[in-house]
Image (spheres, grey):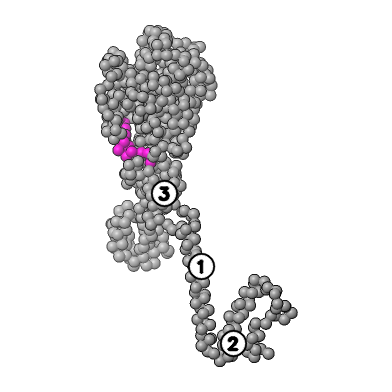
Amino acid sequence: MSVHDDPHAWQRPAPGRSGGGVSLPSWRWLSEAMWRIEHSFGRARADARPEEDTRVRIFVILSLFSAVFVCLALGAANAALLAPKGGVGSIGHPNAVSRADVVDRNGALLATNIVHYGLYIDPAEVWDRGAAAERIKRVLPRVSMAKLNRVLSGDRRLIVMPGLTPGERAAVHALALGGVSFEPEDRRVYPLGASATHVLGVTDTGGQGITGAELAFNQEIRDAGARGESFPLSIDLRVQGVLENELARAVAETQAKGAVGIIADVQTGEILGMASWPTTDRLNRATSAHYEMGSVFKTFTVAAGLDTGRADMNTLFDASQAFMIGNRRITDFHATNQVLTLEEVYLHSSNIGTSRLAVEMGPATMRDYFRRFGLLDAAPIELHESARPRRPTKWDDSTLASLSFGYGIMITPLQMSAAMGALTNGGRFIPLTLRKGGRPDAQVRQVVSPQTSLTLLDLLRRNVVRGSGGRAEAPGLRVGGKTGSANKLVNGRYDPTHAVGTFAAVFPADGPVNARRYSILILIDEPGTYPRTGGFVAAPAVGRIADRIAPFLGVERRADQYRTALGERIPAFEDVEGDGR
């Protein structure tokens, strides 16, 4: 008997199986359910009940649609409520972009993405190739005529030129030429041109950072873009603009080969401005160029002497005659021929005095303090371009003497900026950063005592009032700093026509060690004018920069107690610190 003969046959258990109390496996239950639905239409027809047949069909269709709807609803609920933030399945931000805008600390735009277009031509669809080439060249002058003719003479669709702006695309499109088409390209642009170019760096055509901040913060910039946010740097565009302007002026006045400028907050390590000249050079001299910086290093030698207790400001050093180390004779460029206090050693920039102090402290102490100041390692900053210094291989007396006045070691300007910050912020070495607000993971370490830092601040200010840094003075801003000059090695010899002039400064140099304070470093590479010393080629730029950026930084001008207390500058002393050779 068939199913049609017995309408209740589908309810019976399968042959050979018990129907009482034994549960079928889940897959067999599903199979039985599907079998019942499949044969329900036949039973309805067999019983001559067409209306039941229709109801069953509608019921099945509604069930299927309901099941699909429930699955979709559950998936949507899971994506909205349970998926990780920013993960697969999350709903994207309406303002999301592949790469976030980079802005300065105040929100001014530094880098952004703009849609450009690639120009493509299919020569098979061009009626008059010569006329097409001529018309395209007329509205798009920067296109390569050779490339244009090569594509037009081919037999397949090729790109003629990438990176068309919307205006250029519109101009070509208006020609209404056959075979011409465009494809959108999301390209990184820097609306300020060369400004902050070495800080920002660049990206590749795939939107990945390859230099500068674009590389250093690559993933964070992409993550910020996905959230529809911008990514702020520590740079202050106003400060950056002043720095670049004054650096270019200094280069023009001194006919220099190159220059570097760095401005930083000594309490947070935030870099407010960084410039490397020429801007057309890919080399970032601030991070990657090495220099012997001359007498600026006397600041570290004096700091080590004070901090270890080997000397105080009244300790005497005999500079009445040359200091002999074996056959080497160390002299002062502008000899005083007298016994000097440590303060006078610094203000007169005496090579003899600092050499005697360094040799007395010995190699272990000098190496320890140079390490503390970050002079023996690459400057800890996010930029991948930060280079390691060129350090001495031996630390004998002759080397110690050279190190004391800035020879025998080549460092980057970033290292100098970080080291000067540690000397003027209470003695704490704080890694420099391009991150607004400072680095949350910064490894801050105490390198000298707060008292040593306070003494150095006083000494730096005295050097501007009475010593070699007078040209860095800015009315009411209490600038302190130290000059440095060094000859470069050329063909194995120190050549005075190839020199480096440096001024490392801080302002305001008065007040408590934890007061808000900013460092300025200016380095002029191979000035063509004479004299080539830091006091002449670099210090004037520092004074002008401090004068112009003080309003942006909230530094108030006020009467300076140092002028009354210290009197006039040392007579006839015009930044003549020497190289000891």
Residue 387 drawn above or below residue 52: above
Q: Which residue is at 31% across, 62% downward? A: 173
Query: Which label was assigned to residue 224?
Result: 3
Residue range highlighted in magenta = 233-251
* Outermost residue to the right: 16
Q: Quadrant of residue 140?
A: bottom left
**Is 243 within the magenta?**
yes
In the rendered view of the protein, which quadrant contains the N terminus?
bottom right
In the rendered structure, which amino acid carries the disc numbered 1?
A: Cys
Residue 179 drawn above or below residue 444: below
**Precedes in sequence: disc 1 or disc 3:** 1
Q: Which residue is at 38% across, 14% downward? A: 343
Residue under pointer 1: 71
> Residue 517, percent across and down?
35, 29
Residue under pointer 2: 43
Mark 1 vs mark 3, foreground winner is 1
